[in-house]
Image (tube, helix red, strand yellow):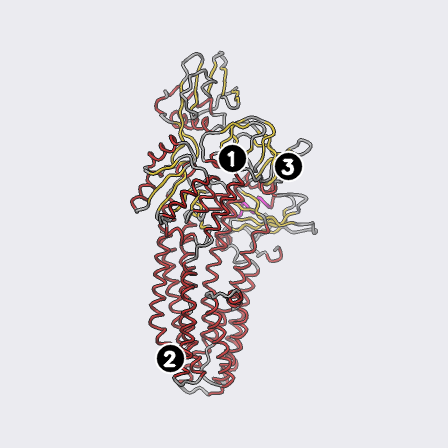
Amino acid sequence: MTALAWLVPVALLLGGIGLTAFLWALRSGQFDDLDGAAYRALEDEPPDQS
Amino acid sequence: MTAHLPAAGLVKEATSAPPTATLVLAVDNMHCGGCLRSVERAALRLPGVSSARASLTAKRLTITVDPAQAGEVDLIAALDQIGFHAAPIEAVKQDRGDARQKYLLRRVAVAGFAAMNIMLISIAVWSGTASDMEPSLAGAFRWLSALIALPTVVYAGQPFFMSAADALRGGRLNMNVPISLAILLATGMSLYQTMLGNEQVYFDAAVALLFFLLVGRFLDESLRVRARGEAQNLLSLQGGIASVIEADGSCSQVAAHALRPGDRLLVAAGERVAADGVITSGHGQIDQSLITGESTPVTATPGTRVYAGTLNLTDALRIEVTAADSATLLAEISRLMLAAEQGKARYRRLADRAAQIYAPAVHGLGLATFVGWLLLGASWQTALTYAISVLIITCPCALALAVPAVQIAAASRLFRQGIMVKSADGLERLAETDLVAFDKTGTLTLGRPELLDEDASPDGVLAAAGALAGSSRHPYARAIAAAAERRCGKVVAAAGIEERSGEGLLRVSPEGEEERLGSAAWCGAESGGESSEVWYRRGTEAPRRFRFADALRADAAETVAVLKHRGYGVVLLSGDCAAVVEDIARRSGIETWRAGLKPADKIAWLEASAKEGHKVLMVGDGLNDAPALAAAHASISPASAADLSQRAADFVFQGDKLAPVLEAMATARRTRAMALQNFTVAAGYNAVCVPLAMAGFVTPLIAAIVMSTSSILVTLNAARLAGRGRS
C-alpha cells in the first residue's frame, strides 16, 4: 500500500503537467489556426526573417 | 499579442520600440501553406511592419505595424500585387466570440483532467469495496476525489451556474437549471457523505457530467464564432477601398469603413461606389441592379443620389458622402428590415423548444423520486441519492451535445463547399421550408447582360464591334467583346476610340471611315423601343442592332427542376418589369412569378404565404431583397449580394452556380433528421433508465457511465454527417 502514497501523487502530477501544457498552448495561440499550423510544420526554411 | 506569438511566426527583430498598432485584415483567397507564407512575407517587406501572422482557419492576417510608416491601404496594395484580395476588419468587433470560445475550452480541459483522475480513483474505490480495501484508504481516496472535484466544479461549472442564475432571476427555467442542480446536489451530497465516511460518494458522476456538457457548449460556440467570422470577412472584403479627394485636390486611398459624411470621393468608370452619397460632378450611367433589382442602367447627373454597391459604368464621378437620410430608399429598407427581424426573433430553436418541456419534467421526476422514497420510509440520504441519479440520467446531454454536434458537422460540410452558415438556427429553419422564392437579377441571373441572337450577326460585324467595345467598361460593351472573343478568338481593342458617356463609342479609321457603337440615336438608327439594345454602324452601311438580356446562371433551370422534383414550390419575385421577368421565368422553368414588386410588396407576399401555412425560403441578393430576406422563414444570398442583404441572409454561397442552394437545403434536411435521430436515442435511453433510477437500481456512478455512453453515441452519429461530405 505504500506504493500508492507516491503513485497517486505521480499520476496527478503527470496529468497536471498535461493540463498545464494544454492551457499554456491555448494561451500562446497555438490553437488559433489549426489549418495553417499543419502547413507550417512542412515549411523548410527557418521561421525567421524572410 | 506579440509576446505570445509562437516560434513559427515571422517576427522581425525590433531594434527600438517604435509606436505600434495592430491591424487585422481579412484575406480572401488564401488556401494553402504557400499562400500563408507569401502573405506574411509581403506584409513584412513593408517598412514599419514588425510582425505578421496569417491564419488559414480564419483567413485573416494580423500585423503589428508602426502607424507612421505604413497603413491598411499600403498593406492592401502590397497584397494585391501578389494576387491576394484583402480588406481591413475593425479590430474591436472580432475578439469577443474568440474569448468566449477559449473561456469554454479552458474549462473543457480542466473538467476533462479532473473527470479522468476522479474516475481512476473511483474505480479503485468501487472495486475495493467489493474486495479487501481498507476503509481508511478508501476514505483517503474519497477525500482526494473531493479535493480534485470541488475546485473543478467551482471553475468549470461557471457557464452553467451563471446562466441558471440569470434564468432564475428572470423567473424562468432553462436547461442550465437542472444541470446546475444535478451538479451542485451531487457534489454537495458527496462531500457530506465523505465527511461521514460513507460509501455513497459521486464526485465522478458530477465531474463527468460537467465535462460532456462543456464539450457540447464548446462545439456550439465554435459554430457561432466561425459563422460570425466568415460573415465579417465577407462584409469587409466587399467594402474595399475608396479614393478620397482631399481639400488640396490630391487623391488618397481610404478603407471604405473609414469614410465619413462630407468626404468627397472619386469613382472611376467600372468601380463600385463605396458609400451612399450625392453626385457633385460628372455625368454617366450607373448600374443599380444590386439596389433595385432592375437591370437597365440609370443615368446619373449632379444631384443624383447614389448608393453603396452600385456600379459606375461610364465616366468618372465625384461624389459627396452623405449620412443615411430618413427619406431615402435605404432608410425605408432598414426600417422594413428591423420590423422583419423582430418577427424572426420569435423563432425558438429545436433544442430550446425541447428544453421547455424537458426542464420541468426533469425537476418533477427528481422531486417525485425524493419525496416518494421518503414516504416509503427510506432515509433522506438514500432518497436524495436516488433523486440525484434521476437528475444525472435525465440530464439533457442529447439536447446540449447532440444538436450542436450535428450542426457543427453540417456547417463544416457546407463551409467546404463554399456555403457559409451565418445564423446558428438557420439550418433548422431551412429544413422546414416548403416554398422557394427567387429574386431575379443577380440570383437566378448572373446580374450581367449577355448578347442575344449572337448568330444573327456576321463574323466581320461582331469582330469589328468587339474591337470597338473592347476599350469600354460598359456592361453591354463587355458582353459584345466577350461574344466576339468566343466567336473570333482574341479581340484586340482598337486604337483611337472616343467614348461619349450615355451615347456610345466612336472611332475614325486612318482611311477616314467612321465606326460607331452605341444608342440608336448615336448611330442614327430607328430605335426598336427597347432600352436593352446597342447599335453598330460602319461608314454609311445600315446600322445593326445588338440585343441583350441578363444571363441566366448556368444551372438555374436545372436547379428549379430539381426543386420541383423534390416537391418544393418555386416562385419568382422581382422588382423588374413584367416582360423581362416573364422571359426569365419561362427560361428557368418557373410558372409562378410576380413583377414590379417593391421591397414592402415582397414582404406582403411573404406574409400572405406564411398565412397560407407555407414556410418560405427566400433566395435573393439585391438591397431591395434585404427586408424580404430578413422576413422569410430562411434565406440564402450569393456572395455577390449587397452587404445589407448578406447581413440579413442565413446562408451565403459563393460561385456562379445555384447548386449550393440545393446542397444547403439537402444538408439542412439531413441535419434535422440526424438531430431527431439523436433525440430518439436519448429518449429511448431515458425511457429505459429513468424508471430504473427512480426505482433506486441505478447509483449515480452507473448513471454517469450510462449518460456518457449515450453522449458519445449521439456525437459519433453526428460525425457521420461531416464524414460523408468529404468524398
Q: Is residue B121 above or below residue B328?
A: below
Q: Chain of mark 2?
A: B
The residue positioned 53% from the left and 75% from the top of the image is B150
The magenta stretch spans which residues?
Answer: B36-43
Q: Is residue B449 above or below residue B107?
A: above
| Outermost residue, left side | B565
Three-letter amino acid code at the position of disc 2: Gly
In front of the other: A42 or B515: B515
Q: CA distance from mark 1 to mark 3?
A: 19 Å
**Is B383 colored magenta in this rendering?**
no
In front of the other: B192 or B369: B369
Structural crowding at the residue carrying mark 1, measured as other residues with C-alpha within 10 Å and reported as few (<14), some (14–19) or many (≥20): many
Looking at the rendered structure, the secondary structure element under dot 2 is loop
- Ranked by sequence position, the earlier of labels 2 and 3 is 3
Residues marked 2 and 1, same chain: yes
Structural crowding at the residue carrying mark 3, measured as other residues with C-alpha within 10 Å and reported as few (<14), some (14–19) or many (≥20): few
Residue that badge 2 annotates:
B696
Give percent across and percent down for residue B186: 47, 76
Residue that badge 3 annotates:
B262
Q: Is residue B725 visible?
A: no
Give percent across and percent down for residue B445: 40, 36
In front of the other: B541 or B388: B388
The residue positioned 38% from the left and 68% from the top of the image is B710
In front of the other: B7 or A18: A18
Q: Chain of mark 1?
A: B
Q: Are marks 1 and 3 in contact (CB under 8 Å)?
A: no
Residue that badge 1 annotates:
B310
Three-letter amino acid code at the position of disc 1: Thr
